[in-house]
């Protein structure tokens, strides 16, 4: 039986908060559409032995093994608001969870369930659009980072995202300079920005071919912060 095509509003809802069978399907599609931006992020993170890493919005956990391939001696935590994605991520990463090197939790990014200074790196791929307001989540990230810790935000530019029908449904799009200012207003020092343009490919909802510009931006928490 041919799979029913989602409307733009339905696709947007599933991209924001995957649920049910459609959420599982969207998670698989996001793995494909996010592959290049995630690979870019993996290099940009500059993982090192001993890092305490928090990922916000890890989806179905498809890319978690790639983090450990980059650096095996890290402690990973994934946080996602979707119970479906949390279940999928746990199921596909049981070995590293049983080994005590990873934990995957359900929760929201604007109320991170950890003490101040817990993590050396926090990153998020393609979820900035859903943080309302972004400052609330970034203040939480600042709180749970160690002094000198880093946040890495990976997102796609407004000018290349605004062509997609689903972004009209509760997405907030950004250009790099706006994101830089938001980070600086929180207290982060923006030290590095990288951009790449992807080859044309199908949009996450399968509706059209798109050519997206990916951005990775690093913010560093002041060493004097507590």
Image: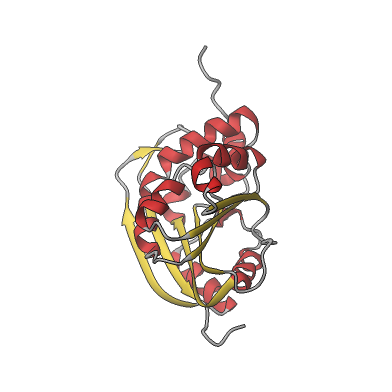
Indicate the position of residue 17 as horizontal and vertical percent values: 63, 43
* Residue ID at (42%, 34%): 208
Residue 187, image quadrant: bottom right
Q: Where is residue 169 shown, x and y percent of the image?
A: 61, 44
The residue positioned farthest toward the left in the image shown: 199
Of residues 53 and 140, the one nearer the viewer is 53
| Quadrant the C terminus occupies | bottom right
Which scheme is used to colour this image of the protein?
secondary structure
Relative horizontal placement of residue 225, taking residue 62 as reference (left or right)? right
Q: In the displayed image of the protein, which residue is found farthest to the bottom?
A: 224
Counting every numbered tag in the picture gives: 0
Q: Residue furthest front?
A: 99
Residue nearer the viewer, 84 or 199 = 84
* Above or below, 161 relative to 33: below
Q: Residue at x 55, y 72 (%)?
A: 182
Taking the image as shown, residue 217 lies to the left or right of residue 6, namely: left
| Quarter where residue 203 is shown | top left
Q: Residue at (46%, 60%) from the top-left corner? A: 74
Give x and y (percent) for residue 221: 52, 78
Q: Residue 70, position in %: x, y?
A: 35, 56
Residue at figure coordinates x 35%, y 38% from the top left: 201
Residue at the far top in the pictured view: 1
């Amino acid at each position: 039986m041919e799979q029913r095509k989602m409307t733009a509003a339905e696709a947007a809802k599933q991209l924001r908060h995957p649920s049910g069978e459609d959420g599982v399907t969207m998670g698989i599609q996001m793995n494909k559409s996010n592959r290049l931006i995630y690979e870019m992020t993996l290099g940009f993170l500059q993982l090192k032995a001993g890092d305490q890493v928090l990922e916000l919005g890890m989806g179905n956990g498809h890319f978690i093994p790639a983090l450990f391939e980059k650096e095996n001696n890290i402690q990973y935590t994934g946080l996602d608001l979707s119970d479906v994605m949390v279940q999928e991520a746990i199921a596909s990463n049981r070995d590293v969870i049983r080994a005590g090197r990873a934990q995957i939790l359900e929760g929201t990014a604007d109320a991170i369930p950890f003490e101040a200074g817990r993590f050396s790196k926090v990153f998020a791929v393609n979820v900035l659009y859903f943080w309302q307001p972004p400052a609330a989540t970034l203040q939480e990230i600042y709180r749970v980072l160690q002094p000198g810790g880093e946040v890495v935000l990976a997102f796609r530019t407004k000018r290349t995202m605004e062509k997609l029908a689903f972004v009209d449904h509760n997405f907030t799009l950004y250009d790099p300079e706006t994101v830089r200012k938001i980070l600086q207003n929180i207290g982060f020092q923006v030290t590095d920005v990288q951009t790449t343009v992807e080859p044309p490919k199908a949009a996450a909802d399968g509706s059209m071919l798109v050519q997206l510009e990916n951005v990775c931006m690093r913010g560093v928490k002041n060493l004097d912060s507590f």
